[in-house]
Image (cartoon, helix red, strand yellow):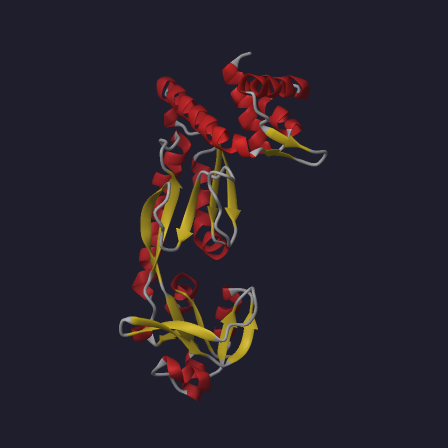
Amino acid sequence: MDKLESMQAFVAVARAGGFSAAARELGVPVPTLSRRVADLEAALGVRLFERSTRQVVLTDQAQAYFTACRQMLDDLREADEVVSGEHLLPKGDLSITAPVGFGRMHLQPIAFEFLREYSQVNLRLQLVDRLVNLLDEQVDAAVRISALPDSSMTARHLGEVRMVVCASRRYLDQHGTPQHPSQLIDHSCIAWASLGPLKSWLFREGEQETMFPIRTRLTVTLPESAVDAAIDGFGLTQVTSYQAAAAVRSGYLVPVLREFEAAPTPVSLVYPSGRAATGKLRTFLEFCGPRLSEVLKSVREVL
């Protein structure tokens, strides 16, 4: 048994979620790939995959082994690139994740620019509003908009975002400008939530963060829709600073209650610690990080 070939086969099957897709990726027949995995299972004395007619998934015993094999193969590929000089021209597959709104508005244009410059990199851009486990889901890096707990991730701080309340000048002229969050109950408010209507918004008063009740005139599932409704004069809305910045910069929306805004939330690029970033990931981080920082800086200059 060629141990390296068997490990490559194992990692490819785990990533692809099946033998046929992995065989196409490696350019080998399915029986050959299956034999390599079977040889590895025999040598280790454990079953690596749970197989069914619909899917192939890692067993519990194989999870840690997959992470170690993937790291080893990445390190070996990186060493090959350094020796051959290929690190000067990144190539291969790269997987990045980010929240939907921020990703589509700000990361996606930078990712497209990156692909135009590095034609041999294949990018998987996963925009989802959930916490993606980078190791379990084989994702190379993530944009995180949250305070980061102690973890196995390396983080690059990019900037901050705030939750801001805005309304159109027309609405404020007709209904007045709230001077305190407690006055929102007397105003028309536009809430956005995917899990049901919101009944309160978060603010900071002194050293305390407090939820204040709102009177909801309209509830939508997307913050972009809330911004559109506020521009049309239907009421006040609370969205992230990067979602409101363009409308505020253009004069369509006016921020209010600035002195009561909750503490800002950090924005970071994170990737797994404990291993050197591959050449293509390192290139992406150096390409993307400064550009995202500039985006957040421009938002901060407006809000």
- Nearest the eye: 247 or 214: 214
| Residue that sits furthest to the top in the current view | 1
- Nearest the eye: 72 or 52: 52
| Residue that sits furthest to the right in the current view | 53
- Nearest the eye: 60 or 83: 60
Asked if 252 appears above or below 281 in the picture, the reply is: below
Measured from the top left, where is residue 127 in percent x and y? Answer: 51, 50
The quarter holding residue 176 reads: bottom left
- Residue at horizontal 34%, vertical 39%? 286
Quarter the C terminus occupies: bottom left
- Residue at horizontal 36%, vertical 33%? 274
Asked if 25 appears above or below 268 in the picture, the reply is: above
Residue 6 appears in the figure: yes
Asked if 166 appears above or below 223 in the picture, the reply is: below
Query: From the viewer's perspective, is 217 left or right of 165?
Result: right
Measured from the top left, where is residue 216 in percent x and y? Answer: 52, 79
Residue 253 appears in the figure: no
The quarter holding residue 16 reads: top right
- Nearest the eye: 250 or 274: 274
Asked if 57 appears above or below 105 in the picture, the reply is: above
Measured from the top left, where is residue 235 in percent x and y? Answer: 48, 79
The quarter holding residue 1 reads: top right
Measured from the top left, where is residue 169 in percent x and y? Answer: 41, 80
Q: How many numbered marks are there?
A: 0
| Residue that sits furthest to the left in the current view | 206
